[in-house]
Image (cartoon, rainbow, N blue to C red):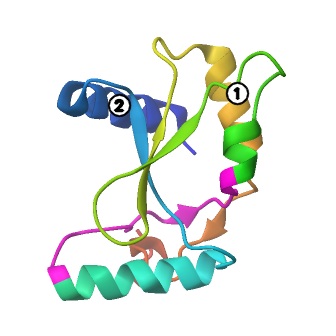
Amino acid sequence: MERGNLIDTAEACRRRYGFPGLSVYSWPDASVREIAFRVKAIRDRTGHPLLQHGDLRKSTAGRIRNAGSPDRHPFSLQKTGGEGHYTLRLPSPTTDEDWDLLDQTFDAPELNPVGLKANFGA
């Protein structure tokens, strides 16, 4: 995750919806590859340019919700949009420590099999 891009995306969410957040997709027990192809099917059906990132990172709803300390869990998931789509809500303001914790909450990047990088080297 490129922090600068994430910050820009979170701020765009704040301007649009009133809270900072990131767009994520999730289906129970699905691998990164399975999620990518499910989102590609939605992209093909709707024509929306979804999930074209070069790399994807995996986490679980539990890891996201339980991140942090016993007295502070800064992240939550809110069902938004169509099938499988959620917004990962971030604290406001989002601190460097929050961004570091978010990074630790996800696995290492994997090549997005339906993204621009895998298909066009971008």
Q: Amino acid at mark 1?
A: Asp
Identify the residue at image location x=72%, y=18%: 72
Q: Is residue 55 magenta?
A: yes
* Marks 1 and 2 close (CB-CB < 8 Å): no
Q: Is residue 120 left or right of residue 64?
A: left
Q: Quadrant of residue 60?
A: bottom right
Q: Quadrant of residue 71?
A: top right
Mark 1 residue crowding within 10 angstroms, few (<14) / some (14–19) / many (20+): few
Q: Is residue 64 left or right of residue 71?
A: left
Residue position marked by numbered label 1 in the rendering: 100
Q: Secondary structure at mark 1?
A: helix
Residues 46 and 52: in front is 46
Q: Amino acid at mark 2?
A: Asp
Q: Which residues are magenta?
A: 46-61
Q: Quadrant of residue 57?
A: bottom right
Residue position marked by numbered label 2 in the rendering: 8
